[in-house]
Image (spheres, coloured by chain):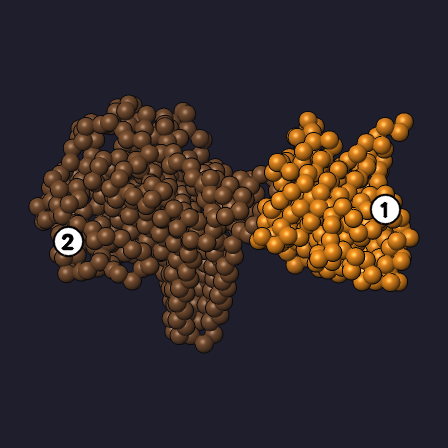
Amino acid sequence: MTETASRLDELIASEYQHGFVTDVETDAVPRGLTEDTIRLISARKNEPPFMLEWRLKAFRHWLTMTEPKWSTAHYPAIDYQNIIYYSAPKSMKDRPQSLAEVDPELLKTYEKLGVPLKEREMLAGVAVDAVFDSVSVGTTFKDKLGELGIIFGSFSDAVREHPELVRQYLGSVVPYTDNFFAALNAAVFSDGSFCYIPPGVRCPMELSTYFRINAKDTGQFERTLIIADEGAYVSYLEGCTAPMRDENQLHAAVVELVALDHARIKYSTVQNWYPGDKDGKGGIYNFVTKRGDCRGVKSHISWTQVETGSAITWKYPSCILRGDDSIGEFHSVALTNNYQQADTGSKMIHIGRNTRSTIISKGISAGHGQNAYRGLVKILKSAEGARNYSQCDSLLLGDKCGAHTFPYIEVKNPSARVEHEASTSRIGEDQLFYCQQRGLSVEDAVSMIVNGFCKEVFKELPMEFAVEAQKLMSVSLEGTVG
Amino acid sequence: MNLVKEATMLEIRKLQASVEMKPILRGLDLSVKAGEVHAIMGPNGSGKSTLAQVLAGRDTFQVTGGEVLYQGRDLLPLAPEERAREGIFLAFQYPVEIPGVSNVYLLKAALNNVRKHRGQPELDAMEFLALIKQKMKQMDMSEDLLYRAVNEGFSGGEKKRNEILQMAMLEPKLAILDETDSGLDIDALQVVSKGINALRSPDRAMILVTHYQRLLDYVVPDFVHVLAHGIIVRSGGPELALELEERGYGWLEQAAAPSSLSPLRSTGAP
């Protein structure tokens, strides 16, 4: 190995920065999953009967399903009876009525993560719902948003306070029969965020959920539901971290977005779950179903994701373009280092006339990382004049990693236009030497090249997130490449 | 005041270098003073580009013997970026493409790294743009090249001009130009030569690596050296280049064939 290469290796070995554990007493249900577990979870959350029924139906359906095996990810069998399906900090048992009553230990956790929950200290313009293990611990700016008729808060609150909305939309985009992990989530989901933007309202601030897995052997199964009514607009951010543990932890979330006529939803994720150590021990299994339904005419949903964490990422944020002239977008950066595996991409289902979709996927593989793009563009017979543009680029750092692309295209309408471009490149020693010869260190050169590669996606992120994402990329790459 | 002009910029003594165990440079001597322009000529495979890369610190070449002093200091332990910040610039024979990184971004990062090293304040975006636009005008380059990815989709001539532009921005003490004339048509050659001549200065040394005499019509060197089989076999003034043009390299190459070779027979710098 040349000197440049070995310096790159050192560069790629930095530590996960959010790996600490918060010491809080938890109230957890016993390990394992039976109908009783589900009844227990539902009871803990004082849910109306319709929710329990829905969960039980999902559970019974889940029992008939088998885990999907088609992804490129390899991992030992998951023992679903050895997982704790509900864990909440004890102090949440008698739910605090406001942020002021939240356990200071929990507030400290979020401060440490750079997500202060005290409104006066917050970045103006971002409202946060913080989810700790299985429950939402607090939501900021709730009242201010309420004045505009915006409902933003924990899913549990929404189930109790707005059962009619939940009932109408829950499972309408991702039914519990959709897939194995979605069925599991429907059965046991504990909390998540709920958001409703009334007709014609432009949400004045970014809404954000910060997910944190803390407890050991616990799965996190959150569910997010966002509804933008006619002509509404909302930009929503999601961040995730978890402590460093030797055992793998399961995270199986479901996100449903509904955009009615002329509504627009922008959904951004920076996913930084614990990726496991440099030998591939531990880390989060991130098996997530995210789907948006452009139900109304001229509705618009865009997904932007930066995936740097998790041992395994399995997610395909998708759009169903039902309304005429609706638009779906997917912008993704997925980075795998050490022994991380990512199988991610998007599905764009064109149903309405003149629907348009764009897929921009950037995969970066370093160390022994494996990165797969898997995507489906489906143009139905009804989708007269539909258009899609897909671009999948892979960047390799070193010679032990891999990049794979699996694009599926189904076109049933002759007037449709579908374009797909793909490229694979690697950061070459000649590129690094060129930059060094101009006075840049190897570190700066790698981060410049990687950020250049991701630029198209980063520019889709809200400002603060874009800066965060750039930093995250540099940290995640420390110690890479050969 | 002759002191600056007399200072030795680069002193190469018995330099040996190999690639994958194969010796390329086999005891090369060369001395370059500030203000001088040296042309290194020689047939393909004689080691010209290897010399350029070794001086810039490329680690695909292993230095197996000899020493290199740069401004009186041992150059060889320094990393490539340290050499660059100390004022060594290599204009690449094949400038590298870096997709996604704009030309202007790389240049600004490069210049500010070098300035920081020299203890000069970093330039802000406005100052930088003013400076680079002025230099681009001199190089007859269109401004849209600034915002395109580094060398991506550049024509051969644009790539070479871009190298000289970078040199003009970074103001090196020792510039090594590796086959800068290759692949240029006559118009581009003139522009590039003008750029190089504009950078000649009493406190800057230049080494032009070239296969053909053509460039030397426009950039007249102070010294010409002929490299064959990894050593300098003949040194002279600009007239040597003309002689080579006429007679080719064969008559000098034979003298340096490895079987009959003793590095000591190299004539070195005049």
Q: Which residue is tagged 1?
A: B223
Spatial CA distance of label 1 from label 2 is: 85 Å
Chain holding disc 1: B
Residue extending farthest to the left is A36
| Residue at the image position 53 percent from the left and 47 percent from the top | A2
Q: Which residue is tagged 2?
A: A59
Label 1 sits on a secondary structure element that is: strand
x and y, in percent, of residue A264 in the image? 43, 51
The answer, for residue B32, to whether it is visible in the render is yes
Report the side of A349 relative to A192 (left or right): right
Q: Which chain is orange?
A: B
| Residue at the image position 22 percent from the left and 43 percent from the top | A219
x and y, in percent, of residue B169 in the image? 74, 40
**Compared with residue A319, is residue B52 higher up or lower down, i.e. above or below?**
above
| Residue at the image position 26 percent from the left and 35 percent from the top | A214
The color chain A is rendered in: brown
| Residue at the image position 39 percent from the left and 67 percent from the top | A408
Foreground disc of the pair 1, 2: 1
> Which amino acid does the dot numbered 1 rest on?
Phe
> Which amino acid does the dot numbered 2 rest on?
Phe
Chain holding disc 2: A
- Report the front residue among A313 and A224: A313
